[in-house]
Amino acid sequence: MIKVLLVDDQSLVRNGLIRILNQEPDINVVGECEDGDQVVAQVLRLIPDVVLMDVRMKRMDGISATQALIAKNIATPVMMLTTFGNDEVLRDALAAGATGFILKDASTDDLIRATRVIASGGAWLDPAITDRVIEHYRRLHPQQDKSEIPVDALTAREREVLLLIAEGQTNQEIANQLFVSEATIKTHISHIFSKLGARDRAAAIVYAYDHGIVIPRG
C-alpha cells in the first residue's frame, strides 16, 4: 500500500485529490497538511511513501517545506503540484530536492501513475514541462554532464531499461514488460548508473533525453 501525505492550503483541492487517490486499491492518503510548516511533524508521525505538495501556501511554501525535510535528513520523496509557466518555481523546487513535478491540471491517470512511480523510487516529470525541468536540472548539476559518454556504452537491454525509466515506469512495470524479475531490472539500473556516473534516476533521465533515447512528450 502506497501511503500519501497531501499538503495544500485549499481544502477543496485536498478533498478532490483524496477522492481520486483513495479510489485506487494500492494507494491510501494517510494524512493532510493545510500548510508547509506542518509537513515535517506529519512525515515523522505518518511515515508516508510520497508527499504530494503544493508550491504556494500561506505560511510556508512547498519549496521551504521540502528544504526542511532535507535538513532533517528525511528522505521521503516529494512530488510538487505546480502550474505551467513558472520557471523560477521549477528551478527552486529542483534545488530544494523535489523528486517529481505534476501540473495541477494533469489527468487523473497521470496523477495516479506519478504517485506510483515516485513511491517506487522513480522520478516523474510532467510531459508539458519535461524539457524545462531537464534544462534546470542540467544547470543545477553541471558536474553530472556526461554528454561525452556514448550511447553505445550501454547495452541494448540497458538502453531499453533506461527508455522505460524515462517514460515513468516503475521497476516492477519494467520487469513485467521485459519478462524478467524485478531484481534483474535493479541490476540493470545499477549498471546504467555506474556507466553514466549518474547518482540518481533524474540524472539518468537527463542523459536519456539529451541523447535521443527518449523523445519529450510535451
Image (cartoon, grey):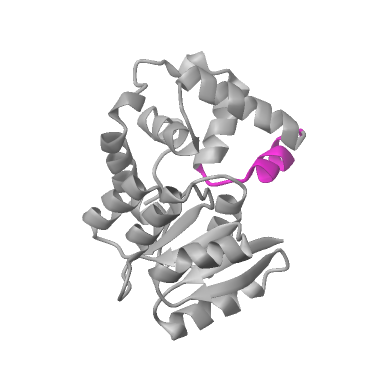
The stretch drawn in magenta includes residue 174: yes
Near-viewer residue (216 or 11): 11
Total residue callouts: 0
Answer left or right for 112 relative to 90: right
> Can residue 110 be seen from the camera position used here?
no
Near-viewer residue (123 or 161): 123
Q: Which residue is drawn at the image coordinates 46% and 51% (left, top)?
A: 72
Q: Position of residue 56 (x, y in %)?
A: 31, 69
Q: Position of residue 44 (x, y in %)?
A: 57, 61
What segment carries the magenta color?
167-180
Which residue is most to the bottom?
Answer: 12
Q: Position of residue 146 (x, y in %)?
A: 37, 21
Q: Position of residue 164 (x, y in %)?
A: 57, 39
Quadrant holding the N terminus: bottom right
Near-viewer residue (71 or 167): 71
> Can residue 20 be seen from the camera position used here?
yes
Q: Which residue is drawn at the image coordinates 50% and 14% (left, top)?
A: 153
Answer left or right for 135 relative to 29: left
Position of residue 73 relative to residue 101, above or below, is: above
In which quadrant of the rendered view does residue 4 lie? bottom right
Q: Which residue is drawn at the image coordinates 27% and 49% (left, top)?
A: 91
